[in-house]
Amino acid sequence: MTQRHVSVEGVRLRFAAAHMATLGDELEPLHGHNYEARARVEGELTSDHWVIDFSVLKRLVREACDHLDHAFLLQRDSTLLEINEGDGQWTIRFRDRSYVFPTSDVVALPIANTTAELIAEWIWQSVAGGLRAEGHASIARLAIEVEEMPGQAGGYAAEL
């Protein structure tokens, strides 16, 4: 089986977001990035001789990026943070620090840490779900890369 690939990056595949990842048993200071996402799919050519239309792949990645844009990314499954949601806000505690964010400013991701690798995996799940739902059965593999700053990126790739 011959595999071909298509990749997209740049044009509106970006999001600005704040986070504070844990490193070992420490918590980074609250800060933000202008993230960029890249996607690559591998698969067989369709009867129209495409792996996938570029615009479809861009749209699915852009939808995931738009969901994260201008938000605080919360690692909802962290074992190091005490996290509570209620009364229209999220409260996050770590040792002697507390943070309170309005619910509308938070995207609570089902991940253990807000690293580029885990954010890429979350985007992968979103894009993979869209590919499946839209019937793109010729795609065998999807890779997502999330760049925090030029030259510094994390990624996730898996078979579909």
Image (tube, grey):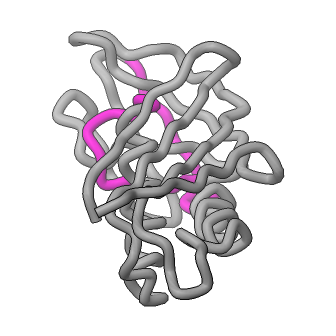
Residue furthest to the right: 11
Give the residue at x 57% y 16%: 152
Give the residue at x 64% y 49%: 71
Q: Is residue 102 magenta?
A: yes
Asked if residue 108 shows in the view, the reply is no
Tell me the quarter of the picture where residue 33 sits.
top right
Q: Range of the magenta residues?
A: 97-116
22 lies left or right of 62: left
86 lies left or right of 29: left
Q: Is the C terminus in the top left, top right, bottom left or bottom right quadrant?
A: bottom left
Residue placed most toward the observer, 125 or 43:
43
Residue placed most toward the observer, 51 or 86:
51
Q: Position of residue 110 (x, y in %)?
A: 30, 54
Give the residue at x 45% y 28%: 154
Q: How many marks?
A: 0
Q: Position of residue 105 (x, y in %)?
A: 63, 54
Residue furthest to the left: 79
Q: Position of residue 114 (x, y in %)?
A: 41, 34
Residue placed most toward the observer, 84 or 6:
6
Give the residue at x 61% y 85%: 48
Q: Position of residue 139 (x, y in %)?
A: 40, 69
Asked if residue 156 shows in the view, the reply is yes
Q: Is residue 46 magenta?
A: no
Tell me the quarter of the picture where residue 126 sits.
bottom left
Q: Is the N terminus in the top left, top right, bottom left or bottom right quadrant?
A: bottom left
